[in-house]
Image (cartoon, rainbow, N blue to C red):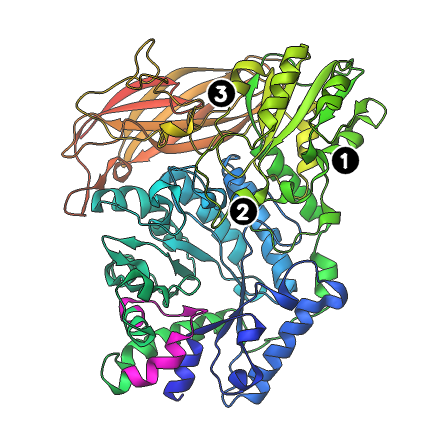
Amino acid sequence: MTLAEKAGQLNQAANEGDASVEDLRAGKVGSIICSSSAYAGNERQDRVRAQAINKLQEIAVKESRLGIPLLIARDVIHGHRTVGPIPLGQAASWSTEDIKRGSEVASREAFADGIRWAFTPMMDVSRDPRWGRVAEGFGEDPFLAGRLAKAVIEGIQGDDLTQNLAACAKHFVGYGAAEGGRDYNTAEITPYTLRNIYLPPFKEAVAAGVRTVMSCFNEVGGVPATANRRLLTEILKDEWGFRGFVITDWDAVGELILHGVAEDRAHAAELAINAGADMDMATGALVAHLEKLVAEGRVCMETIDTAVMKVLQLKADLGLFENPYTDTALADKVQFTPEGKQTVLELAQKSLVLLKNNGVLPIKPTAKNIGLFGSLIEATDVLNGTWCLDGLAEDVITVKAGFEAAIGKDQVLFPSTLNDESLNQARYCDVAVAVVGEHPQRSGEANSVAYIDLPPGQLEWLQGLKRIGVPIVVVVLSGRPLAIQWLEDNADAILFAFHPGVMGGQAIADVLFGTVNPSGKLPITFPRVTGQIPTYYNRKLTGRPLDPYGAGVSRYVDEKDSPLYPFGFGLSYSSYDYSGLGIDRKDDGYEVVCTVANTSKVDGEEIVQLYIRDRVASLARPIRELKGFERVAIAAEGRRQVRFHLSREEFGFYGADEKWVVEEGAFDIWVGPNSIEGLHGTLELV
């Protein structure tokens, strides 16, 4: 290969517009990210996408000197044609198996459209719900994020990479710590916090065999991640043994100039490739400047060869050299199938979180006049949520359609506006179901907010409804935690649905009418008000500790310290009792066991959570840390024994020297339904 051809393999063009026929013939493009034009959603007639990709592949394979196929990428975030819940909603299911199956559906469908590389999972730990991309991740806990990322990777990549997609762990690292929740902003992270909070999910992804990693936009310690050799090479590749390749985020190489660490694009390309960024997304800096940089001795050929070999290896493992083309008839066979829809329906059902219920749910069959209110009851995009590039509006089961299918049209009043007229109609209802929340354009990338309240107008209408005296059920659609203190104080029931996907309307109706027993638990803490942020559960111990749930005690003079809903919280139509905590020492660690009884007459599923606390350590440690969880089905009036195994390593942490250490001493153990309740015991680690 010539140096120009090597540089081409490290160049990802943005859509076909940046991949001209001349560039493809010259071998100047190794990958294309499909995000617009013929690749963008809803242009599916005559299999436009597969045909367009096949044409590009044909030029690369037949008309370039080396005939190297293209690696086609796309943001397949939470489904392709069959859209599942947003990742934050999926995290509320705490179900690795359901998330894996949903990812398998996405991989199968995207493969049929010629996509071979998905920019998922995003495991950026985020403690700030103002950040728009909190919707795209798995919440605030590194342990949960790592386990769920592993499930996504296994689902996307499958057992046979030639029939699936390569996954991409993003954004490496600390993107979720953007100051003020403002996207692309500075992230101030200490080495201690970086090692113990933000890096662990990525280490889990590497251990799961993820084939690519995407660097983040932000800087860590003053060094932008795209030019951060400490992160990309010393930790990711050398320490963890990552053998795949690193791609930058969109134009992140060029943005090194704006960060003030590169004087021009040539300098930016030099910094990125030498730091360990192997492929340049959308900037074109590597393909434009590598030849000159090598000639001037600023980049060595070995660095380029190593990067190119990793790109070619992935293409080989994907089977692109043997078969670069896509069967244009495949999509009709594998997309939006009954099996795929059932998979994302079950995931959506398990992702719904019941936050409050004074007995009004499930809605009784005797309810004759049910009101379904709000402009979102017929919305499709609000159910699919952010980063939905390929879902079709006509595929979506709206909340209204879900109600109609569940109980028919005659029993339900459907006002789609929140105004005086709809309040007047609500007076005649036995129960009023109000669907409120955010449009997906209010969350996702570059959509941060300064206030996490309900959008304007919705709360005022609900206050009017309260004055009427009708039982109120509120369904909240959102890409982030919202400050819904008024709802907690005044509504009769609250179902938080996130953005539940193409089958969301059916899932919501199933839960409201009792066909499905809700079982979701929050993967992120819900503040009472915006001013409480951050309120993450695993905060460190302090010299003047405060029980935020203590009566009459608060460091705020105008609000309680405690969050509205804690991490791991979620209600059910069943009731559960925890008993019999046992902690036994084993050769390789400890076994923790308890019994969970379903004390109701309703079959249910409970997410049992295990937390630890290091009582005395060389550094201040969190008040609680999630170290295990199990989703268990428990029959009505039945009981299940739940066992957890804690290896010795799971009691350790990264110390001040960034080395892993396991310190002996006393540990608290909790097993319970969320991060603030549960059985308590102790053990002595020796």
Q: Which marked residue is nearer to the observer: mark 1 or mark 3?
A: 3
Determine which of the numbered discs, if any, sits on residue 100 in the image.
Answer: 2
Q: Report which quarter residue 442 is drawn in.
A: top right
Magenta stretch in the rendered image: 272-293
Q: How far apart are labels 2 and 3 at the CA level?
A: 34 Å
Question: Would residue 448 appear left or right of 276 to someone viewing this image?
Answer: right
Is residue 26 placed above or below 595 in the rendered structure? below
Q: On the image, numbered disc 3 is attached to which residue?
A: 485
- Quadrant the N terminus occupies: bottom left
Disc 3 element: helix
Q: Which marked residue is nearer to the observer: mark 2 or mark 1?
A: 1
Relative image position of residue 222 (x, y in whole percent): 23, 55
Q: Report which quarter residue 129 is drawn in.
A: top left
Circle 2 residues within 10 Å: few <14, some 14–19, many ≥20: many
Relative image position of residue 56 (x, y in whole percent): 60, 78
- Quadrant the C terminus occupies: top left
Relative image position of residue 253 (x, y in whole percent): 36, 67
Question: Which tag, 1 or 3, sits closer to the chain's start?
Answer: 1
Residue at the spot x=34%, y=20% of the render?
561
Q: On the image, numbered disc 1 is attached to which residue?
A: 401
